[in-house]
Amino acid sequence: MLSKEEMISMLKVHGNDVLDLMKQANSLRKTNKITFSKNVFLPLTNICRNDCGYCTFRRDPEDPDATLIMPPSDVMNTIRKADVYGCREALFTFGEQADTSPQVQDALEKFGFEGMLEYLYHLCERTLNETSLLPHSNPGILQKSELKMLKEVNASMGLMLENSSPRLMNMPAHEKSPGKDPKLRIKTIENAGKLKIPFTTGLLIGIGESLEERTNSLLELRRIQDKYDHIQEIIIQNFKPKPGIKMEKHPEPSLLDMIRMVAVTRILFPECGVQVPPNLNINTAPIFLLSGADDWGGVSPLTKDYVNPESPWPELDELERFTQEIGLQLEERLPVYQKYVKDEFLSEAIFRKIA
């Protein structure tokens, strides 16, 4: 374990000390394998109650390019195509509590559903019964009972903590986003732990947080992991300025900032996967492998990253070249990490499907 003071000191190192930090993190690598999940990205709606200062995904119901609801026929046709491509992860994502919008609620009712979570359950269940893919859902903040319901039809689930500091709720990143209240997000992650749901979470770096707030956020995740041991992967995602967003002129974190964050995350979480999204760092991605990262995350041969549409996924042969150039091997994984393929962490339906 690291103390808060040690972590802050590590996040400030420069010169040769950065190389030493990278070596220390890299020495904790258990294998020479770098994993990825071959997935299909399914944005069920881009209506969201949050209005984050860095988001290009969200739409208002009145916007001409708003997707009130992706029809079930379109969802299943896309998943069947993904099955042909050999994908094994169906990544379901949508704006948080989108069905509080009357327009979204009306669209759901036309398809015979009372709410987003009922619709999501239906799609996950069909995915399990009709294809070779496993569902992984990112539905935002949920109650414990909702998590318990979705565990039945999901191999794993996810929710980014982003940051544990309530101060950011008064900053451009989150001032219009009630769902980014860290207390609510921490409660969801903890409830997933109580229910033994394999979980992916992480931090968003460069949205106005201090080094101390980054450190506190990692320590909060460490506290949860020590208690429940259900966090399979931690994503360290860098903020990217984009035209048209509120934070368009806000600086992104430096490469050095990201290297130090990845290394400290690996040192603090030697048992978890550590991911840096490769499509957001296409020119620098290999350096993060040398800093302790061991996973490329979900990569789709079929669909784009709808949250970051300006950043296309790298081709799989490109990922393989990145990996092999530094002497490591690329390996495909399922959306649930192998250590969690146990009946205590998976529903009977999911466990039977994997077996």
Image (tube, grey):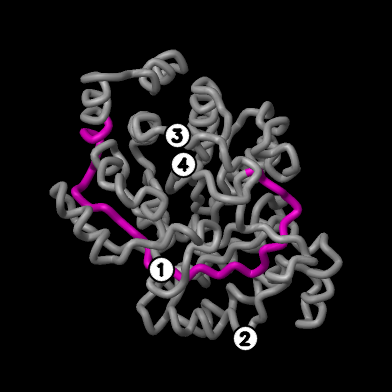
- Label 4 – label 1 distance at C-alpha: 20 Å
- Label 2 – label 3 distance at C-alpha: 41 Å
Chain-order first, disc 4 or disc 3: 4
Q: Amino acid at mark 3?
A: Pro
Q: Is residue 277 left or right of residue 48?
A: left
Which region shows up in magenta? 25-53
Q: Nearer the viewer, mark 3 or mark 1?
A: 3
Badges 4 and 3: C-beta atoms under 8 Å apart? yes
Badges 1 and 2: C-beta atoms under 8 Å apart? no
Residue on which disc 4 sits: 238
- Label 3 – label 1 distance at C-alpha: 26 Å
Q: Amino acid at mark 2?
A: Ser
Residue on which disc 2 sits: 73
Q: Is residue 181 left or right of residue 88?
A: right
Q: Amino acid at mark 1?
A: Ser
Residue on which disc 1 sits: 300
- Helix, strand, or loop for circle 4? strand
In-front residue for pair 73/127 = 73
Q: Amino acid at mark 4?
A: Asn
Residue at image coords 48%, 84% = 80
Q: Nearer the viewer, mark 2 or mark 4?
A: 4
Residue at image coords 63%, 28% = 165
**Badge 3: residue crowd in 10 Å (few <14, some 14–19, many ≥20):** some
